[in-house]
Image (tube, grey):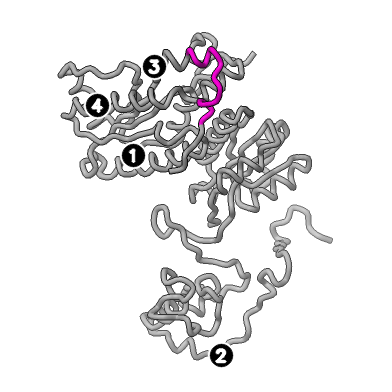
Amino acid sequence: MIIAEQKPFEEIKRSIAPAHKVLVVGCGTCVTVCFAGGAREAAILAASLRMAFKLNGDPKEITEVTVQRQCEWEYLDAVAEQVGKAEVVLSLGCGVGVQAIAERFPRTWVVPGLNTSFLGMPAEQGVWVERCAACGDCILGLTAGICPIARCSKSLLNGPCGGSQDGHCEVNADIPCGWQLIYDRLKALGKVEMLYEIRPPKNWRASRDGGPRKIVRPDLRLIEEE
Amino acid sequence: MVERTYPLVQPIALVERAMAEDFEPQITAFYCIYCGYMAADTAGILHIQYPANVKFVRLPCTGKTDIRYILEAFEQGADGVYLVACPIGNCHHVRGNERGWARVKRAKKILDEIGLGGERLEMFFMSGSQGGAFAIAAQTMTERIRRMGPNPIRLSEVRAGRPDTETEKEDSEEVDFRGRRSKKSG
């Protein structure tokens, strides 16, 4: 899922300062699960902002609403009326959610309340780790289910660099070396010989190198293309 | 700890000064139904006096503490908020009080950021037999909040000419599905 964290309170305050009517829009999907922008976080932020501005002598009308998914029109349409009344929408969705609101409501000023961090998972309660870089050409089948793009600091494809020390990355000793993890797992599974295979270069055009990406599925479209 | 200047220390209008002089803190306290409630009961049985300005809200466990509850109490005008939980290691839900304490610590940071001051929020740990400790917690918070002064949000409402929410009659309010009072529209 998408992992995000809330922006510093002062930054959020500054971004909505000129407006009087503010709508905080939470998202009920990824950012709810990572406790960054769900209904609870939206309520906490809205209450904090209401109190902070009141104390500054500039009381604002700050309300909150949470949609199931900010990145789908259907769910956004459900709050169109509230969005229309707001001078600024403070989105607690990921970057996709913020842009979806901007695109669906062309006359609405929208600002982000979160920094979208990465694609990852909770390693334990309160700890999230990056696991995928959305590179568009998955090679996990060749690397024992451990992603060298996301988990090697240099995204190397041909084994560890010289900075790998005792299984730790040279960027930070807290980061395990991605390639050490791959090697250890392949060894445990008795498949180390897979590393000897010569592979063609990875297709980076499927990643950001090919510009903004798009997937079209004719079988799912409502209107068939001519 | 960063020194903060609260709106309270700005030149105070007469009504605010009156408010500050006869200031009796309104405190909301959340206690768990195990040690917290039992400690309150013990205090009652032993006839131990504690300040009457503390209003209690029961929680099934302080692990149920939600930062929303704490902020809502402050937003509705509480001058201070505190929690009463089982001693660490003795929670009836094993670690509920530790979770509550972690949230209280986070809420304190939020209150600092808002400008209300994290010291307006506290958490006390005691066993069910400690009626005296229960009274001391109430006294400690009352004294602390009396020293800190009224919730600046209430002051800012007075300054803005808005009616004090407390003096309003309940008839003018309606209760929403979460039991929260809101002013009737129209």
Where disc 3 sits, the SS reads loop
Rendered location of residue A61, percent (x, y): 63, 28
Left-right relation of A150 to B67: right
Q: Amino acid at mark 4?
A: Ile
Q: Which residue is mark 4?
A: B136
Rendered location of residue A5, percent (x, y): 53, 51
Residue A24 highlighted magenta (yes or no):
no
Q: Amino acid at mark 3?
A: Glu
Q: Residue at x 47, y 59 (%)?
A: A121
User: Is residue B4 placed above or below A92 in the rendered structure?
Assistant: above
Q: Nearer the viewer, mark 1 or mark 3?
A: 3
Distance (Cα) linking label 1 and label 2: 55 Å
Q: Nearer the viewer, mark 2 or mark 4?
A: 4
N-terminal label among 4 and 1: 1
Rendered location of residue B90, percent (x, y): 21, 41
Q: Which residue is mark 3?
A: B24
Q: Which residue is mark 1?
A: B63
As drawn, the label of residue A198 is 2
Distance (Cα) linking label 4 and label 1: 23 Å
Distance (Cα) linking label 2 and label 4: 74 Å
Magenta extent? B6-18
Q: Nearer the viewer, residue A1 or A167?
A: A167
Q: Amino acid at mark 1?
A: Gly
Q: Residue at x 31, y 16 (%)?
A: B52
Where disc 4 sits, the SS reads helix
